[in-house]
Image (cartoon, grey):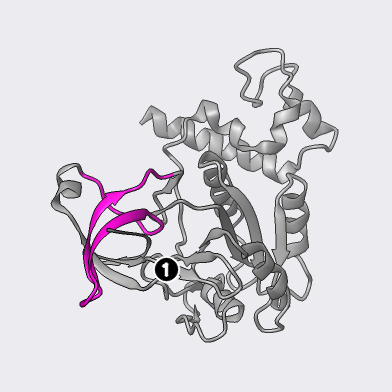
């Protein structure tokens, strides 16, 4: 019996890297009976057929975390990738990515790509907002080969997942980080100003510089309706030291003597972030109502 990590899953076949080779495996029927689906990133035990480089997954080790979208397990950090331009940064979508990463208790890093297209450097306002939270932000340009070494250093010896909207340039970044990878990249749709989906499934890629990274399918919408409205505030880390409010259940909306609103007025909490907090709070309240 061998132990390894699932690096890819397609059509009921799972590709398990044991360190001494990759085995094409199927999962035993017991997983289907228990309604358990093996995920990319799972550490598994397999019964191997060395001659055919095939096998069966016998056991799935306990997961330290699990994402639904993308469907992947045992991640050390999430790298949220947005383009500075083409497509423009969708602030509401970015906030939801950040909230979801906090909800899953993941280390977060943000990559603002295609900075060469933003001649007015408007993306720097977004960088300032993110760094005030604070999140680590790396600005990159695949065309100008800027920020690639810094991004590569942050991936070293970690299991990372690249997540973000279509057209942000996730695959292009990985092609530069690991020359010879040749991931398919797509052009921006001129009609709808968004990227084409070039990555069809999550796949863990072993980096020569150390670590593994998953390139995942991009998307243009992302919902976090599983989060309770009352708990949303806990996924805005900049609120933490200002929650000395008069009322224990304060949602920092219209309540008097609210520590978060006082911090906002004093400029210690970013106004853009707070406005998105209110918008998402109302959105989650409406979801529960209906």
Mark 1: few/some/many CA within 10 Å (<14, 14-19, 20+)? few
Q: Is residue 49 magenta?
A: yes
User: Which part of the image, by quadrant, shows the N terminus?
Assistant: bottom left
Please give the name of the residue rendered at 48% of the width and 81% of the height, measured from the top-left corner.
185
Decide: is 103 above or below 27: above
Decide: is 168 above or below 223: below
| Residue annotated with mark 1 | 19
Please give the name of the residue rendered at 37% of the width and 59% of the height, measured from the top-left corner.
40
Boundaries of the magenta span: 35-63
Q: Quadrant of residue 149?
A: bottom right
Q: Quadrant of residue 242?
A: top right
Residue 289 location (% of width, % of height): 39, 28
Nearest the viewer among 78 and 234 is 78
Residue 281 visible in the current orientation: yes
User: Which part of the image, by quadrant, shows the C terminus?
Assistant: top left
Decide: is 116 above or below 98: below
Q: How many marks?
A: 1
Residue 236 location (% of width, % of height): 64, 37
Q: Does the magenta stretch include residue 166?
A: no
Left or right side of 280 for 61:
left
Which SS class for mark 1? loop
């Amino acid at each position: 019996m061998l132990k390894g990590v699932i690096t890819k899953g397609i059509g009921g076949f799972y590709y398990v890297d044991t360190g001494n080779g990759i085995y094409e495996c199927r999962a035993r029927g017991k997983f289907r009976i228990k309604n358990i689906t093996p995920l990319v990133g799972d550490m598994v035990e397999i019964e191997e057929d060395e001659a055919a480089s095939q096998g069966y997954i016998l056991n799935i080790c306990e997961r330290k975390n699990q994402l639904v979208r993308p469907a992947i397990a045992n991640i050390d950090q999430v790298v949220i990738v947005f383009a500075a331009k083409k497509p423009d940064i969708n602030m509401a979508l970015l906030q939801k990515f950040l909230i979801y990463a906090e909800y899953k208790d993941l280390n977060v890093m943000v990559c603002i790509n295609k900075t060469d297209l933003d001649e007015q450097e408007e993306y720097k306002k977004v960088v300032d907002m993110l760094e005030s939270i604070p999140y680590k932000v790396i600005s990159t340009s695949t065309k100008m080969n800027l920020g690639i070494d810094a991004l590569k250093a942050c991936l070293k010896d970690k299991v990372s997942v690249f997540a973000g909207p279509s057209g942000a340039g996730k695959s292009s970044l990985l092609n530069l980080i690991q020359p010879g990878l040749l991931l398919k990249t797509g052009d921006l749709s001129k009609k709808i100003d968004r990227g084409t989906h070039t990555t069809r499934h999550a796949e863990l890629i072993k980096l020569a510089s150390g670590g593994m990274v998953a390139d995942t399918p991009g998307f243009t919408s992302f919902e976090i309706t599983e989060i309770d409205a009352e708990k949303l505030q806990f996924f805005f880390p900049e609120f933490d030291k200002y929650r000395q409010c008069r009322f224990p259940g304060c949602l920092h909306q219209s309540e008097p003597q609210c520590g978060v609103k006082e911090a906002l007025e004093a400029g210690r909490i970013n106004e853009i972030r707070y406005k998105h907090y209110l918008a998402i709070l109302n959105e989650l309240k409406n979801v529960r109502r209906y």
